[in-house]
Image: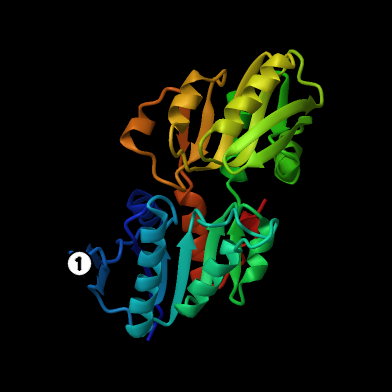
Amino acid sequence: MEEELKVFSGSSNRELAVEICQYLNIELGDIVISRFSDGEIYCQVQENVRGRDVFIIQSICSPVNDNLMELLIMIDAFKRASAKRITAVMPYYGYARQDRKDKPRVPITAKLVADLLSAANADRLLTMDLHAPQIQGFFNIPVDHLFAAPVIVDYIAKSNLSDLVLVSPDAGGVERTRAYAKRLQVPIAIIDKRREKPNVAEVLHVIGDVVGKTAFIVDDMVDTAGTLSQTARALKEAGAARVLACASHPVLSGSAIQRIEESVLEKVVMTNSIPFSEGTKKSPKLIHLSIAPLFGEAIKRIHDNASVSSLFL
């Protein structure tokens, strides 16, 4: 029997799943996901997947625990329905920020999630812009790690920004910022900061020339937007003429939108790895870019056993 591609979606990012299926010119798979009265997740696949190549699209975003558990249950359902191969497609890999033991008696949740996916019998992982690239090594299954850079860099290039300098919000993001800068052939700057506790960052000073330039902050995610707003303010104080930003994952928790609106940032460019709320879509400062073609092409190549490396930055 000829192997057939099947794409299904959890409830975390159905809009992206629909866009991906439109790119692939296929119908989104039929699956029922509901809740028992006590909150337990019920799942039933509504079509035959025996011997099929199944891709499950699910971002591990808010509500994080529900979406993670939903993904594990879906994987189990497809395994018991005799799918030939199950690929977990996670545009946003939740729990990735705890990727090492940097303090006594703390968990490594990025590794825990990897173990859970393997225990549920996922055969492969497709994800984008992991908080730490070495998380790929936590898996004993193949991991395809995509980057939002082609989508974001294309937007920046078409914006025709004068005297552009790309800015890394911390030392850990220098490699990402340098990769963007190499494609755009522009210089970089770095923010020296010290994080006292989670979700609280203190900006110390700017390393690099930003005076009179258009500073474009490059980050992997925006959560509370505290770091982003402080970084933007530091760049302005250092003499930047304009400050913009981009991030792969719009977590945008708490009062993040308010912080962005009240900051000196002109625009913040983000992908739809996490769905935007209706309120977020109305913000004039937020630019929404779709990663559906990127993931659609990756899924097509994985299904055809073709090379995915050309999609990497």
> Residue at coordinates 69% horizontally, 21% vertically from top-left?
235
> Residue at coordinates 69% horizontally, 61% vertically from top-left?
134
Residue reaching furthest to the left = 37
Whether residue 254 sits left or right of residue 191 in the image: it is left
Whether residue 80 sits left or right of residue 250 in the image: it is left
The answer to whether one can see residue 160 in this image is no
> Residue at coordinates 66% horizontally, 55% vertically from top-left?
132
Within 10 Å of disc 1 (Cα), the crowding (few <14, some 14-19, many 20+) is few
- Report the quarter where the N terminus lies: bottom left
Which residue matches tag 1? Answer: 36
Label 1 element class = loop
Colour convention: rainbow
Residue reaching furthest to the front = 104
Whether residue 181 sits left or right of residue 38 in the image: it is right
Instruction: State whether residue 288 is above or below residue 284.
Output: below
| Foreground of the two, 47 or 199 | 199
Q: Position of residue 21 (x, y in %)?
A: 36, 57
Q: Position of residue 172 (x, y in %)?
A: 73, 45
| Foreground of the two, 276 or 65 | 65
Residue reaching furthest to the right = 208
**Residue type at numbered disc 1:** Phe
Q: Position of residue 140 (x, y in %)?
A: 61, 77
Instruction: State whether residue 288 is above or below residue 124.
Output: above
| Foreground of the two, 130 or 106 | 106
The answer to whether one can see residue 237 in this image is yes
> Residue at coordinates 71% horizontally, 34% vertically from top-left?
184
